[in-house]
Image (tube, rainbow, N blue to C red):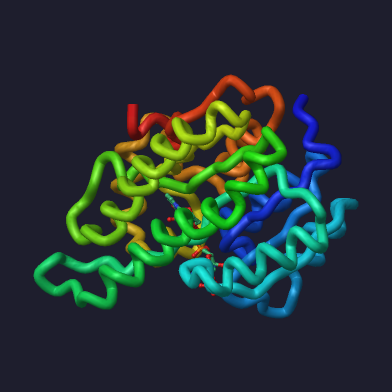
Amino acid sequence: MISLKGKNAIVTGATRGIGLEISKVLAENGANVAILDIQLGDGSAIKEVEALGVTCKGYACDVSNPEAVDEVFKQILADFSKVDILVNNAGITRDNLLIRMKQEDFDSVLNVNLRSAFICTKALSSHMMRNRSGRIINMASINGIRCQAGQANYAASKAGIIGLTKSNAMEFAARGVTVNAIAPGFIKTAMTEKLAPEVIAKYKEAIPLKDLGNPRDVANAVAFLASDEAAYITGQVLGVDGGLGA
Ligand code: NAP
């Protein structure tokens, strides 16, 4: 059993998919959650997390914009006074073969998936280092390790997340702040719903555990890395992929 009671977490890209599930699992373990997303929609994600008995506030913010992030993080620190956990989860895909990939699709994927993690970590690093404690968890992907055709932008961004994670882990270790990455395999979300049924069937066949994962599988790994029990783990990439990356 882990407990995150009294801890405050920021989760980016958290109004749906894996980010929402992470917010819910952190809340189930007692953490208050600041949900950051480019748009908050009808606010149902905030209500779902709040219903778990914690404080949850939503902040609309493009995480690839440093000025917007600085402003929102100032507001979060004013609202929560302390932040213990940062989950850099926001991500997008703009797949295409390199020959057809538009420059803007390369840039936007790098900006949202990688640059945002740099921006959000930088915005919070002095706060965490001053507190001499903190947990930063970055969302990588199996496709940043074992890459596929048509994902030059996505693969580069997720391989970059792994480099950023390891470098930040070395910089923050002496201050009690751990930095780890999770590399999900194929998880049932809107991102994978776009795939053709025959592609999904092919993946299932290749995955040793013979199924796609659920957002909760990823969220449980985040909650563990965010806990006191994971204090001696830093600079690691944890695969949540049914054995695909083994
Ligand atoms: P998702 O369902 O598409 O959710 C991503 C969230 O991020 C959405 O709420 C999206 O907002 C938000 N977002 C997009 N751009 C943003 C920005 N500039 N600023 C703030 N928020 C932004 O994706 P997911 O499947 O849950 O994936 C979550 C993370 O896991 C991503 O980093 C992804 O690369 C990684 N991952 C997913 C899988 C998988 O199988 N699903 C596998 C490996 C890794 P909108 O709704 O407005 O677009």
Which of these two is toward me, 116 or 95? Answer: 116
Which of these two is toward me, 40 or 231? Answer: 231
Residue 217 lies in quadrant = top right
Which of these two is toward me, 181 or 96? Answer: 181
Counting from the top left corner in percent of width and height, residue 133 is at: 68, 34
Viewer can see residue 78: yes
Counting from the top left corner in percent of width and height, residue 85 is at: 67, 44
Across the whole image, how many numbered discs are drawn on residues? 0
Which of these two is toward me, 56 or 208? Answer: 56
Residue drawn at 30 percent across, 37 percent down? 206
Residue drawn at 60 percent across, 67 percent down? 70
- The quadrant of the picture occupied by the N terminus is top right
Tell me if residue 182 comes above or below residue 150 in the rendering: above
Residue drawn at 73 percent across, 51 percent down? 24
Counting from the top left corner in percent of width and height, residue 39 is at: 61, 77
Residue projecting furthest to the top: 232
Counting from the top left corner in percent of width and height, residue 41 is at: 67, 79
- The quadrant of the picture occupied by the C terminus is top left
Residue projecting furthest to the left: 99
96 horizontally vs 199: left or right: left
Residue drawn at 35 percent across, 71 percent down? 108
Residue 208 lies in quadrant = top left
Viewer can see residue 238: no
129 horizontally vs 83: left or right: left
Tell me if residue 197 comes above or below residue 7 in the rendering: below
